[in-house]
C-alpha cells in the first residue's frame, strides 16, 4: 500500500511557441526549436544557458530581454513508466502528476490529452492521470502563456475605458500583475529587476497512491495540567481504497530526555469514507516537551518530532508499509498579538507576547532572495537566516510582494528561533475582489498555503498583504483612482474565513500598515514610516533625522538605501562602469527617487564621492547611521513602541537598495550596525542642542546594573568632559535619560559611552560624532594590526587605534567572496583595541597571504 513518488527532473526541453503566420518560414506556428531545459527553473535561466540571452543582471542587459516576457513558452519531457509501476496503484488507487510550483498560467497535457490548467504561482497543482498513463514513454507537455500579456488583457477587460469606479490601468491601481496570482515583485519593484519570467519553478513528481494519503494535518497544544500537557492531532485523510482496514498512527518522539528515543504512540482506526478528519489527543509529560524560544543561546532549537502515518490496521508487522507519512519538528510555545486600547482612549497598542513575555520585535523585511526564485538553495537561505540570528533578530516579515516561502525557509526559522510575520502575497495594488473567480482562486491558494505553513513553530502572524489599504486611503497621491478599496473582500472575508477553518490559533492582521480609522495612524497598530527617504511630508527633506518624529506603536517598515558591496558590482559591471554616475550604476538604481536625490541623501552627511568605491563606502556608512538612528529611537520608545522591522533585509540582484545584505550575501555597513543596535542591552545616545543624553534599553528578563560612563573626547584623544553614574535598569524596559553630557559646539570631538559590569566587563557602548562626517578633519588614527590563525578555519585580526578611527572597513582584495567577519565598519576610540574573527577565507591562503590582501579604510 506504499505511496510511490518519482521525481521528473530529466529530459526536459523548452521552446518558444509562436502564433500561426508570425514567422515567414514557419507559418503553421507552434514550437520551432527545442532546447534543453532545467527543472526547477525559469525561462530566462534556460535561455541564458543556451546562449540565447546574456545574463540579464549584467550591465543593462535586463532591457534586452524584455521580449521574453511577451512570448509564450512550452516545456516538455518524456516519462518512462514500467508495467510494474502502472500496476502499483492496485484496484482503486490513483496516479497523479504533482507540480509543486508552476510559473504561472499554463495548460498541462499528457500524451496529447489535456489534463488540466493552472494559474497560480504560489501553490502546488495536482493532476489525476490514472486513465492516461501508459506503459513505456509518456509525453508530458506544459504550455505557458505570457503572464504579462494575459494580465494586461484581463486588466483591459476589467477596466474597460477606465471611466468606471475601478479607474484605469496603472501600476498602483490595477496593473497586469493584479490579475495574475504570481509573485508581484517579478513584474518589477523599486529594488528589483523587471523580469516577469515563466517556467516550472519547483519540482515535478509522479505520485502513485494505492490506498490513502494524509492530505492535511495540524496539531494544537492544550493547557498544561499538572505535569502533563495534551497535544491534539487533527489529520485529514483522503482514501481511494474503501476496503483495506486502515488506522492512523501518531508518534511523538521527544528531542530531550534521558533516554533520548522514547516515543508516545497512538493508533486510531480510520473509517471507509473518501474524506475524513481524524482527531486524537496524546497526553505528554510536559517536562519532556521541547520549548521553543526566540533566538536562544542554543545554536539550534531543540525540537521534538511528530509523525503521522496511515497504515494497514492488521498486523504490527505491517507497520513498515505505512501508506502515507507526514512529519514535523515541533516545540511548545505560545504567541499572542496584544492590542490593548490606551488609557486615554487615543490609540491602541500592538505587541507580541511570546511564551508569556512582552517582546520587543527586532528584525527586518524579507524579500525573495533572488529575482528567479527557483535557483535559491537551502545553503543560501541558511546563510541569510543565520545572518539574521547573528544580528540579534527575533523576527522576519515575509513581505507580500514575494511569495509564501519554501519549506527550507520555515525549517530554518524554526531551528534558529526567528519568528515569521507572513504576509499573504498581495502588495501595493488594488485587487479585483468583485470577480467571483478571483476570490475563488485566492481562497484555494490561501487554503493550500495555510495548510502547508501552519505547523511551523516560527509562524507568528498572518497578514492580509502589504500597503493595499494604505494605497486606497489616498496616501500615495494620484496613484489610485479606484473609488473604493478593491481588496476589501480579500482581507476582511476570504482570508479570515480560511484561517478560521484551517489555522484558528495564529493571529491575523488584515494588512500592513493597519489599525485605526486611518491605517497609517501612528497611534494604532503597525505603521510604515516613509517620511524618511520617500519624504511623504511636503516640509520634509527625507533625511534620516526625521525618524525622531515617529511615534508609532510598531514600525513594520522604514529604511534607507545604499549601494551593494564591490563584489556584487564586480559581478555585473564592466570596469568602465565603476564610476559614480555611470549609466550602469544608474540603471541598477530602481529606487525611483532619482539618482541625484539618492546621491544628495549621502552628501548631506558625507563628502562628495569621487570614485565608485567612495560611493559604496559613504553610501553604506550613511545607511548604517540612518538605521542606527531610527532603531535606537524606537527602542528608546519601548513601552509605547514594541517593534522594528526595517526595510529591507536582503536583495534579489545587484542593486542600490534599502537592503543591508546584498544579493551576493555580503553584508553592508548597516549589517554590523544591526549587531550593535539590536543588542539585548543597548546604550543609546541622543543629541539635543548642545547636550547628548545617554539611555539604556534592556531587553533581557533580568535587571541590568553597571557603571555608565559618557566621555567627550577630541579625535586626538584629549578628554574634554566625563559623566559617570551607577545605574540599574529593570527587566525588559527602556530607561529614560540616565546621564547627560554637554557638548560645546565643536567638530573635532566625539562622545563615547560605555556600560561596564561589576567585574569591569563591557556590557555595551556607543559613539556619537559631533559634526557631520563631511566636515570633520580627522587626524591619522595610527592603526596597528596583526593577524593570527589559531585554527585552519579561523583567523583573528587584532586592531588598535592611537586616535579616533571612524567606520573602520576591512576588505580583502582579489577574493571571489569576502570571508565572514565578526565585525566591520566599527569605530575605535583612542587607545581602543578590537579583535575580529575571520572565517570562510579560501583554505589554501596562509596568514601572510591573507594579510597581504587586507585593505583598511576609515573616515
Ligand atoms: C515599501 C515596501 C515596498 C517598497 C519599499 C521601498 O513601502 O512595502 O513596496 O519596496 O517600501 O519603497
Image: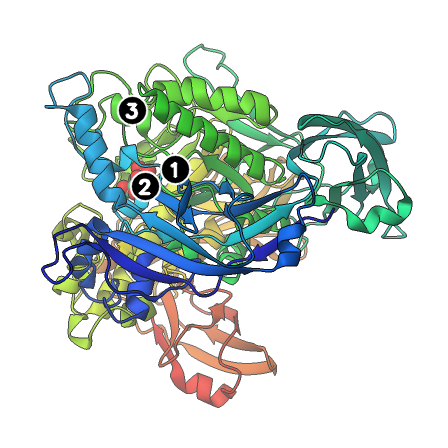
Identify the image quadrant of residue 209: top right
* In the depicted structure, whether residue 145 falls above or below residue 77: above
Q: Mark 3 = which residue?
A: 432
How many numbered marks are there? Answer: 3
Residues under numbered marks 2 and 1 in contact, where contact means CB atoms less than 8 Å apart: yes
Residue at 35% x, 26% y is: 438
* In the depicted structure, whether residue 812 falls above or below residue 222: below
Q: CA distance from mark 2 to mark 3?
A: 15 Å
* In the depicted structure, whether residue 93 falls above or below residue 563: above
Q: Is residue 634 visible?
A: yes
Q: Quadrant of ligand 1?
A: top left
Identify the image quadrant of residue 777: bottom left
Residue at 49% x, 14% y is: 341
User: Secondary structure beneath disc 3?
Assistant: loop
State whether label 3 is within 8 Å of ligand 1: no
Q: Point out the image quarter for the C terminus.
A: bottom left
What is the x, y in percent for residue 754? 51, 53
Query: Label for residue 400?
Result: 1
> Which circle, 2 or 1, is nearer the viewer?
2
What is the x, y in percent for residue 825? 39, 63
Q: CA distance from mark 2 to mark 1?
A: 8 Å
Q: Mark 2 = which residue?
A: 184
10 Å crowding of disc 1: few (<14), some (14-19), many (20+): many
State whether label 2 is within 8 Å of ligand 1: no
Q: CA distance from mark 1 to mark 3?
A: 17 Å
User: Secondary structure beneath disc 1?
Assistant: loop
Q: Is residue 207 left or right of residue 251?
A: left
What is the x, y in percent for residue 461? 52, 32
> Which circle, 2 or 3, is nearer the viewer?
3
Residues under numbered marks 2 and 3 in contact, where contact means CB atoms less than 8 Å apart: no
What is the x, y in percent for residue 288? 83, 42
Residue ranking furthest to the top: 345
Amino acid at each position: 500500500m506504499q505511496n510511490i513518488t518519482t521525481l521528473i527532473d530529466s529530459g526536459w526541453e523548452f521552446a518558444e511557441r509562436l502564433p500561426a503566420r508570425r514567422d515567414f518560414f514557419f507559418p503553421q506556428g507552434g514550437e520551432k526549436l527545442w532546447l534543453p531545459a532545467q527543472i526547477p527553473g525559469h525561462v530566462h535561466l534556460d535561455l541564458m544557458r543556451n546562449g540565447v540571452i546574456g545574463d540579464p543582471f549584467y550591465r543593462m542587459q535586463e532591457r534586452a530581454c524584455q521580449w521574453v516576457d511577451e512570448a509564450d513558452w512550452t516545456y516538455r519531457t518524456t516519462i518512462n513508466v514500467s508495467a510494474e509501476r502502472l500496476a502499483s496503484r492496485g484496484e482503486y488507487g490513483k496516479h497523479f502528476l504533482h507540480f509543486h510550483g508552476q510559473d504561472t498560467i499554463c495548460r498541462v497535457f499528457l500524451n496529447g490529452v489535456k489534463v488540466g490548467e493552472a494559474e497560480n504561482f504560489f501553490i502546488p497543482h495536482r493532476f489525476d492521470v490514472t486513465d492516461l498513463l501508459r506503459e513505456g514513454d509518456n509525453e508530458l507537455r506544459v504550455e505557458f502563456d505570457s503572464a504579462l500579456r494575459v494580465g494586461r488583457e484581463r486588466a483591459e477587460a476589467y477596466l474597460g475605458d477606465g471611466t468606471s469606479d475601478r479607474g484605469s490601468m496603472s501600476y498602483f491601481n490595477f496593473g497586469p500583475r493584479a490579475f495574475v496570482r504570481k509573485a508581484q515583485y517579478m513584474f518589477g519593484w523599486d529594488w528589483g529587476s523587471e523580469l516577469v519570467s515563466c517556467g516550472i519553478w519547483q519540482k515535478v513528481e509522479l505520485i502513485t497512491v494505492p490506498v490513502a494519503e494524509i492530505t492535511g494535518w495540524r496539531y494544537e497544544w492544550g493547557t498544561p495540567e499538572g505535569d502533563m500537557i495534551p497535544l491534539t492531532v487533527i489529520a485529514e485523510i483522503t482514501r481511494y481504497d474503501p476496503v483495506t482496514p486502515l488506522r492512523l498512527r501518531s508518534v511523538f518522539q521527544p528531542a530531550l530526555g534521558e533516554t533520548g528515543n522514547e516515543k508516545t504512540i497512538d493508533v486510531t482506526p480510520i473509517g471507509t469514507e473518501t474524506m475524513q478528519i481524524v482527531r486524537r489527543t496524546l497526553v505528554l509529560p510536559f517536562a519532556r516537551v521541547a520549548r521553543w524560544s526566540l533566538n536562544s543561546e542554543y545554536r539550534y532549537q531543540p525540537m521534538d518530532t511528530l509523525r503521522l502515518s496511515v497504515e494497514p490496521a492488521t498486523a504490527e508487522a505491517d507497520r513498515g508499509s505505512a501508506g502515507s507519512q507526514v512529519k514535523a519538528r515541533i516545540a511548545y510555545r505560545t504567541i499572542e498579538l496584544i492590542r490593548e486600547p490606551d488609557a486615554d482612549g487615543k490609540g491602541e497598542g500592538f505587541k507580541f507576547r511570546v511564551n508569556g513575555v512582552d517582546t520587543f520585535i527586532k528584525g527586518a523585511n524579507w524579500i525573495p532572495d533572488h529575482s528567479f526564485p527557483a535557483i535559491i538553495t537551502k545553503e543560501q537561505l541558511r546563510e541569510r537566516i543565520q545572518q539574521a540570528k547573528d544580528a540579534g533578530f527575533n523576527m522576519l516579515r515575509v513581505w507580500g510582494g514575494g511569495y509564501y516561502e519554501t519549506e527550507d525557509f520555515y525549517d530554518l526559522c524554526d531551528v534558529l528561533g526567528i519568528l515569521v510575520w507572513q504576509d499573504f502575497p498581495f502588495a501595493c495594488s488594488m485587487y479585483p475582489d468583485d470577480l467571483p473567480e478571483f476570490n475563488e482562486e485566492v481562497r484555494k491558494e490561501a487554503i493550500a498555503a495555510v495548510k502547508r505553513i501552519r505547523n511551523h513553530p516560527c509562524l507568528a502572524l498572518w497578514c492580509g498583504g502589504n500597503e493595499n489599504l494604505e494605497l486606497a486611503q489616498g496616501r500615495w497621491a494620484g496613484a489610485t483612482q479606484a473609488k473604493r478599496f478593491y481588496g476589501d473582500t480579500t482581507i476582511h472575508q476570504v482570508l479570515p474565513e480560511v484561517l478560521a477553518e484551517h489555522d484558528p490559533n495564529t493571529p491575523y492582521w488584515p494588512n500592513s500598515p493597519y489599525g485605526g480609522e486611518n491605517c497609517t495612524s501612528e497611534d494604532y497598530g503597525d505603521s510604515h514610516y516613509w517620511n524618511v527617504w520617500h519624504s511623504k511630508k511636503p516640509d520634509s527633506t527625507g533625511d534620516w533625522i526625521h525618524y525622531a518624529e515617529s511615534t508609532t506603536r510598531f514600525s513594520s517598515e522604514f529604511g534607507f538605501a545604499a549601494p551593494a558591496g564591490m563584489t556584487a558590482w564586480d559581478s555585473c559591471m564592466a570596469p568602465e562602469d565603476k564610476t559614480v554616475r555611470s549609466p550602469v550604476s544608474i540603471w541598477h538604481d530602481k529606487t525611483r527617487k532619482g539618482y541625484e536625490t539618492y546621491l544628495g541623501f549621502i552628501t548631506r552627511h558625507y563628502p562628495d564621492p569621487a570614485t565608485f568605491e567612495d560611493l559604496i563606502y559613504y553610501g553604506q556608512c550613511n545607511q548604517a547611521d540612518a538605521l542606527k538612528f531610527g532603531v535606537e529611537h524606537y527602542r528608546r520608545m519601548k513601552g509605547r513602541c514594541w517593534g522594528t522591522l526595517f526595510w529591507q533585509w536582503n536583495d534579489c540582484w545587484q542593486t542600490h537598495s534599502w537592503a543591508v545584505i546584498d544579493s551576493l550575501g555580503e553584508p553592508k555597513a548597516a549589517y554590523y550596525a544591526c549587531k550593535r543596535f539590536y543588542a539585548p542591552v543597548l546604550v543609546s545616545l541622543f543629541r539635543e542642542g548642545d547636550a547628548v543624553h545617554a539611555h539604556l534599553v534592556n531587553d533581557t528578563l533580568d535587571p541590568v546594573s553597571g557603571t555608565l560612563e559618557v566621555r567627550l573626547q577630541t579625535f586626538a584623544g584629549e578628554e574634554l568632559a566625563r559623566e559617570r553614574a551607577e545605574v540599574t535598569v529593570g527587566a525588559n524596559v527602556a530607561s529614560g535619560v540616565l546621564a547627560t553630557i554637554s557638548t560645546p559646539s565643536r567638530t573635532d570631538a566625539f562622545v563615547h559611552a560605555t556600560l561596564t559590569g561589576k567585574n569591569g566587563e563591557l556590557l555595551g557602548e556607543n559613539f556619537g560624532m559631533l559634526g557631520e562626517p563631511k566636515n570633520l578633519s580627522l587626524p591619522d588614527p595610527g592603526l596597528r594590526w596583526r593577524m593570527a590563525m589559531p585554527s585552519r578555519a579561523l583567523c583573528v585580526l587584532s586592531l588598535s587605534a592611537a586616535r579616533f578611527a571612524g567606520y573602520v572597513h576591512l576588505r580583502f582584495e582579489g577574493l571571489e567572496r569576502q570571508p565572514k567577519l565578526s565585525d566591520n565598519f566599527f569605530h575605535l576610540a583612542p587607545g581602543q583595541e578590537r579583535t575580529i574573527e575571520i572565517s570562510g577565507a579560501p583554505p589554501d591562503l596562509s596568514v601572510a597571504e591573507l594579510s597581504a590582501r587586507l585593505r583598511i579604510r576609515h573616515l
